[in-house]
Amino acid sequence: MSQRSGLPFWPRHAFWQGVALTIVAYVLFDWGIPALRFVGIPSAPVPNSVVVEFMFIALIGIFMYVSENEARWAEFKQPIQSALVNRDKKWLRSSLLVVLPLFVGFMTFESTRPRVTADIQPRSIHPAPPTSITFRNKTIQLAGLENPLRKQGNLEDHMKEGRRVYYQNCLPCHGDLLDGKGHFGLGFSPTPLAFDGGNLPLLTESFVFWRVAKGGPGLPKEGTPWNSAMPVWEDFLTEDEIWSVIIFLYDQAGFKPRAWEAEGKEAAHE
Amino acid sequence: MWQTNLKVLTVGALVLGFFTMVAHIVPQQASEVPEVLTLGAGATPEMLAAAGEKIFSGAGGCTSCHGLGTRAPNLVTDERGAGPIGARCGKQEAGKDCKTYLWEALTAPAAFVVKGYQPIMLDQRRTLSVDQIWALVAYLESNGGEVTVTGQDIVDAQAAAGAPKPAAAPAGERIDAVAVLGEFGCSACHKLKGEGGEIGPAFDGMGGRLTKDYLREAIVDPKAKVAKGYEENKDMMPVAFGEQLTKEQLNALIDYLASLK
Amino acid sequence: MTDPLYLLQAAADTAGAYGRFPGIGARNAVWIAAQVHLMFAAFVLGVPMFAVVTELIGIVTKDYKYDKMSKEFTRLLVFAYSATALWGGVLLFFLTTLYPKFWGYMARLFGPSMWVYIGIFFFESFTLYLYYYGWDRWNHGRAKWGHWGLGVLLNVWGTTVMFIANGWLTFMMSPPAGVTAETLPEQIGLANALMNMTWMPINIHRLIGNAVFGGAVVAAYAGYRFLAAKTDEERAHYDWMGYVGNFIAISTFIVLPFAGYYLGREIYEYNQTMGITMMGGFMSWLWIVQAVLIGMLFLAANYYLWLGMGRIPGAERFVPYTKWMLLLLLLCWLVWATPHTMLASREEMAAMGGSSHPFLNVLGLMSAKNTAVNIMILTTFLSFLMYRRANVRPTVSWAKNGTLVQGAMFGLAAAVVLFYGVYGYFVESIVRIGFSVYQVAAVILCIVGVTVIDVLLGRGAQSRGEIRWGQMPDRSQYALFVLAITFTWLMGLMGFARSGIRQHWHVYEVMRDTSTYASTPGLGYAANMITACVVIFLSLVSVIFWLGGLAESAAHKPKPASGD
């Protein structure tokens, strides 16, 4: 074995190294990442689906590690081979014969057992916006659209107006701190969007306008199944009120909206 | 050798299986086809009715008159105890089944006018294609009755029709604006010389209140500005006049309305 | 209000617009025919590139084994060529019978270019036969160069044919501005339609992709022959062939992401909605699947190189590093495969406070993924370098400094990549997009600089011992299969992405798909289709290889069979 590890508990044998690496990987993904919270990095438990994905990658990597040079591969295979053929390992073979089917059976049971929780609902959180929407019977072209209020009037006034709109309408769900944790927020699934996360700078203002104006019911098919409780704000707010609350949001969260790429290129395709 | 082949096959199957599995685990999102209807020989009654509903409440502008109970009969709700249109359409005109009756009602509305209403409706082929009209028929039938329209109706109708276009007035000929008002059923909603509906502002005295430019806009793009007191009815004014009127008709109409001081 | 327009067009579609196909349906029939045809086409375009390059190396280095390998491949081409034509015929007949209205439109628009296509196809076949059957006749002196010229000509024909067909399919994606549903095909300029906005990006992407594919298939062929070999001599030959194939595949593969990036940009510029559909809309999960595939490619390629070092004297000194490189590759793969929006249950979402993870969210963004892929490219390049240097003992006086400079270049490139990757989080996305150019530039400069130094360093160098060709564990050859299968599957997947972003259009926003198959299926369905296509393709290719083997054993009949 080429590797000489300083750790007292680190196995020298390639087979047990493989086993240990698998456990280490699992511990890292399932406990290590959430534990980052305790050192001040925002983190949370990793969803099961992602842990499974990561474990697949880790297992492929571990397989490559144990087989990537001849000596290690031979060493790795040796206990498996001996467990399969050696006479004195009969007890191991027999117990594996019992344990493995039981394990597979248990996994199958776990994955198919009826539960009270709702199924996982995959959806794309930022579906492709339509090119244009009808806002109170007025057609608004979304592609290439900038926030009109940024070019007219006083930005301070718009901010003030946006603040008023936010506190009168959005606060109960999206929260005082714009963290998506308003009084009602936790009652919904999906929970209201947190504006202090990384989402806002990825979106153009016209996208946010579309989402505010059309709300949960206006999501396209790919955004479903989506039980979003976001109301259709075009019924309650004017165009300018929405634009000003968007200005307020970006300002408060400290982000700049995503700019349109290649201006005027859309015009090339008419 | 066969051992090698088997190993190669196993590796191949494992790799392909792995990729396929990954693709099955991720969310299965299919792209949505916007409600579009294959209206041809293959159209099913459901498709036709669904398409018809969109036209009825959208582009067709039918709800401007139908459903209010005053200008035109209710269609999707009960009318004088006879039920919605699908339930009563077969009994309206002797010798005409539901389908034939509705087709006639849409393409030659003056041929049979329901008692108690004025002949203000227009031939819908002016604005709609034959398959759209058949879709409307199917939708109306589906309200209280059974859809009997088939894709073949559309094919036949398409073969029979070059849908008539509004005849352009020969150049130079003077156009009678009052006749235009009558042809397009304007007085159903607007009062002229004390007669007509009250859904839109009266024509009487309009020239004194409004400029010609405003009138032109009000006809071509009625939603741009709405007269005070008529906000609730702003969806009633058909939006397609800009396309249906010829240039001469439009000018004559504006001149006429502007003269009503 | 666009609906009436759709209705009108739908109305114009009469009963004759679509045909039926028993069992799998019309769409799947065309899907399989097109995909298998495309794979064969990539094969017959990629392998000649490979053959011409290796023949040239053979001429220049006077090393006979390159010439032998070139010829071996051209023989397979002859069979593969008819399979391509056959599947092209299947596709054509399927299109004319199953999508007659659409195909009628395309034929009215592209008619003349189709005639040219067939003409060039004829020349291409003829050139191929001359190239193969003339191999032994024109094998010396000036005639050999003439023969090589035929090979180049073969590539020219092939590329032209591909460019024409690319014009047809890119027209479906990005018809020129001003073309609408009412435009008659005759009113669209042919050149205009062919040279549309995504034409050149697809040309470049496919050209490079074909070279990769050619190399990968050659490597897999060699892998199989290696496993089946009965003599050490044979094993050595196919071991070497597998190495060359893999080298060509991976070195061209490294540039492929840049071509893909160019294509993606052009799609965005052509139509923002199409771009968003591709990257963020219903196809967003496709990129996670793609990340899994590409991670697999990088790992398999490196794995092959590391195993290969076992047969090079002097490579032992690099062995301790490989596990750290493996760790780095895995970390990059993890970053690349981290989804931005996660599949999570209600409780998990509540714990995360949304559907993106507060920490992993950071890794789900483009900045992190670009950084990861560039680091993977650098690591793979380092593996190559170690492989090259394994049995070389430089004799030039500046050897030590040269190696230090190479190391510094690696360090610098990695630093630039990391710096812009991290800095990308602090700037607007419009600026961040520009950063990927710096990252790519750093990586390419590093690759070029290090290679130049390495070539100079190798001048007059001593050998630490010959490479023991043939002494390669079987596992390495399976890595070559994994590479070839993954490339083929990836082609199918990206083909689905390219054609799927048109959604319910035959010709984007011009001609609507009004068939029952108008909606684009989800990834699982697509994956089943891709797997089916790959299985069909690989089975047929195996038959071709087997036929090639038959022809070979007939040619070398007198050779005594050993060890039977």
Image (cartoon, grey):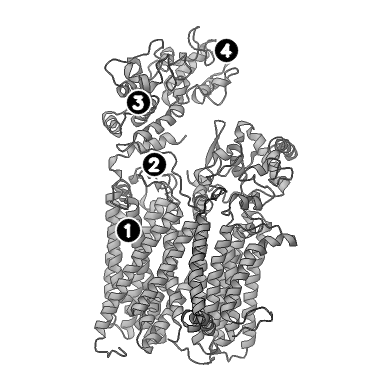
Distance (Cα) linking label 1 and label 2: 27 Å
Q: Amino acid type of disc 3?
A: Lys
Does residue B30 show up?
yes
Mark 4 is surrounded, within 10 Å at the Cα level, by few (under 14), some (14 to 19) or many (20 or more) other residues, namely few
- Please tell me which residue lies in front, C503 or C458: C503
Of badges 1 and 2, the one in the foreground is 1
Residue C107, given in percent of the width and then of the height, sits at 30, 50
Q: Name the residue under label 4.
A: B208
Q: Name the residue under label 1.
A: C33
Q: Amino acid type of disc 2?
A: Ala
Can you say whether B242 is above or below C89 in the image? Answer: above
Asked if labels 3 and 4 share a chain, the reply is: yes
The answer to whether marks 1 and 2 mark residues whose Cβ atoms lie closer than 8 Å is: no
Residue C315, given in percent of the width and then of the height, sits at 55, 86
Residue C345, given in percent of the width and then of the height, sits at 58, 51
Does residue B123 show up?
no
Q: In the drawing, does residue A87 fall left or right of residue B155?
A: right
The answer to whether marks 1 and 4 mark residues whose Cβ atoms lie closer than 8 Å is: no
Asked if labels 1 and 2 share a chain, the reply is: yes
Q: Name the residue under label 2.
A: C181
Q: Amino acid type of disc 4?
A: Gly
Q: Name the residue under label 3.
A: B165
Secondary structure, mark 1, is helix
Distance (Cα) linking label 1 and label 4: 72 Å
The numbered mark, 1 or 2, whose residue comes first in the sequence reads 1
